[in-house]
């Protein structure tokens, strides 16, 4: 059965107009929960960028393809990526048998590169010969944020010490949740996720955090930095961290060995200029405008119904008079064509109907809107609702 399209063509055009006018709060892809004032994308949004491909390391613990390798076991790697911090040191760190070895009197070494929020992988081993106790046994440290905060390195295998100076502690701030260390001389694996504190206009807007995994065991889970911590004193929570800083490794008088050191920078948090997560209403509006422009550009590569739906999608993010007018015209032309000759058009009619039903579900269009009713009547007349 065919339906005369003329009494109804205005309905579908009006529906598209209403869609355009409600665009700032409409839902992309007509599928998942719509974007809101602090989320630029809909849930399951096909317009959201795909994660970039990263090749994992060939072996467990190996550097992935997007990592910066800070030490690969060679003297050349050490020379290219590290410097001694103290020009008046009494000794130099050495490289032997693929290991970077701290030297008593060598002081700190620091990376030539500077890093902000990051994932840092470090493997280390305390001396096989057990000497000393508490903080005097296999002591070193890994400093992030240009040296502002330390993750403790210490041989705590059957070696008690003060808890917030334990291996895997955020030194002076928080003890590790557990002690998963191997014995003296064995290799330990640290994976550290560092988020720097952010202070704006004299106010702490994000305390920063560290997550530490030792030998596959989480010992710090998003531990707030409280300003970074330190020896014998609490740090100021408003302590400024650099946006990017060197990684430092400590000489504490013990010949601790290191190997397989690599680092990956992390995407910025929304509060630090990132776009993945909840944004401010202002940042969300700006991002929606950017997404809408990209979709309109893509719509120019399409025609007919596909272009209509893509333009409708752009209006979900940001209103645009030209896009609205073109989507409305395309909608009217589409309805005229399918209503006049609906045979074989069930799929595309249902596609548009699903988009309109979505708008009704999320209260972007009234259920008794002429355009919604027109498409529904066409579906019923063709028996496609059975």
Image: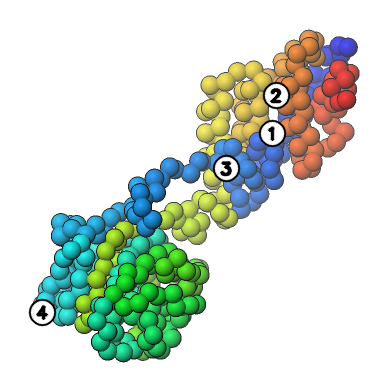
Mark identifier at residue 373 = none
Q: CA distance from mark 2 to mark 3?
A: 21 Å
Would you say residue 62 is visible in this rendering? yes
Image location (x, y in percent) of residue 369: 84, 31
Q: CA distance from mark 4 to mark 1?
A: 72 Å
Query: What's the residue at 79%, 34% (across, down)?
Result: 357
Looking at this view, is 108 or 330 the one in front? Answer: 108
Query: What's the residue at 39%, 45% (across, down)?
Result: 55
Q: Secondary structure at mark 4?
A: loop
Mark closer to the chain start, 3 or 1: 1
Q: CA distance from mark 3 to mark 1?
A: 14 Å
Looking at this view, is 199 or 190 the one in front? Answer: 190
- According to the image, label 4 marks what residue? 90
Mark closer to the chain start, 4 or 1: 1
Q: Secondary structure at mark 2?
A: helix
Mark 3 packing: few (<14 Cα in 10 Å), some, or many (20+)? many
Q: Is residue 145 left or right of residue 96?
A: right
- According to the image, label 3 marks what residue? 288
- According to the image, label 2 marks what residue? 328
Image location (x, y in percent) of residue 229: 39, 80
């Amino acid at each position: 059965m065919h339906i005369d399209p003329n009494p109804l063509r205005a309905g579908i055009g009006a529906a598209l107009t209403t869609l355009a006018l409600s665009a700032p709060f409409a839902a992309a892809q007509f599928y998942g929960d719509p974007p809101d004032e602090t989320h630029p994308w809909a849930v399951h949004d096909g317009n959201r960028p795909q994660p970039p491909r990263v090749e994992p390391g060939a072996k467990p613990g190996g550097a992935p393809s997007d990592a910066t390798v800070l030490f690969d076991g060679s003297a050349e790697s050490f020379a290219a990526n590290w410097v001694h911090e103290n020009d008046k040191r009494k000794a130099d760190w050495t490289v032997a048998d693929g290991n970077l070895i701290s030297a008593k009197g060598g002081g700190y070494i620091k990376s030539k590169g500077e890093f902000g929020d990051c994932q840092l992988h470090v493997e280390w081993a305390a001396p096989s010969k057990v000497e000393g106790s508490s903080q005097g046994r296999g002591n070193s440290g890994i400093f992030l944020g240009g040296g502002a905060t330390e993750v403790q390195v210490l041989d705590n295998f059957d070696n008690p010490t003060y808890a917030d100076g334990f291996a895997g502690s955020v030194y002076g701030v928080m003890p590790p949740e557990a002690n998963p260390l191997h014995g003296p001389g064995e290799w330990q694996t640290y994976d550290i996720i560092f988020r720097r504190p952010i202070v704006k206009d004299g106010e702490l807007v994000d305390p920063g955090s560290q997550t530490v995994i030792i030998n596959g065991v989480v010992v710090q889970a998003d531990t707030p930095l409280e300003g970074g911590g330190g020896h014998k004193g609490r740090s100021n929570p408003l302590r400024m961290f650099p946006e990017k800083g060197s990684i430092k490794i400590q000489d504490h008088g013990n010949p601790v060995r290191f190997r397989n050191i690599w680092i990956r920078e992390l995407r910025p948090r929304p509060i630090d200029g990132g776009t993945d997560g909840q944004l401010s209403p202002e940042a969300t509006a700006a991002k929606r405008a950017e997404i809408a422009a990209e979709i309109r550009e893509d719509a120019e590569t399409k025609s007919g119904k596909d272009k209509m739906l893509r333009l409708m999608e752009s209006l979900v993010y940001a209103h645009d008079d030209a896009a609205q007018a073109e989507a409305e015209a395309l909608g009217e032309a589409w309805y005229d064509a399918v209503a006049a000759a609906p045979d074989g058009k069930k799929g595309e009619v249902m596609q548009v109907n699903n988009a309109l039903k979505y708008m009704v579900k999320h209260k972007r269009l009234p259920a008794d809107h002429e355009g919604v009713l027109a498409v529904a009547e066409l579906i019923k007349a063709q028996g496609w609702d059975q």
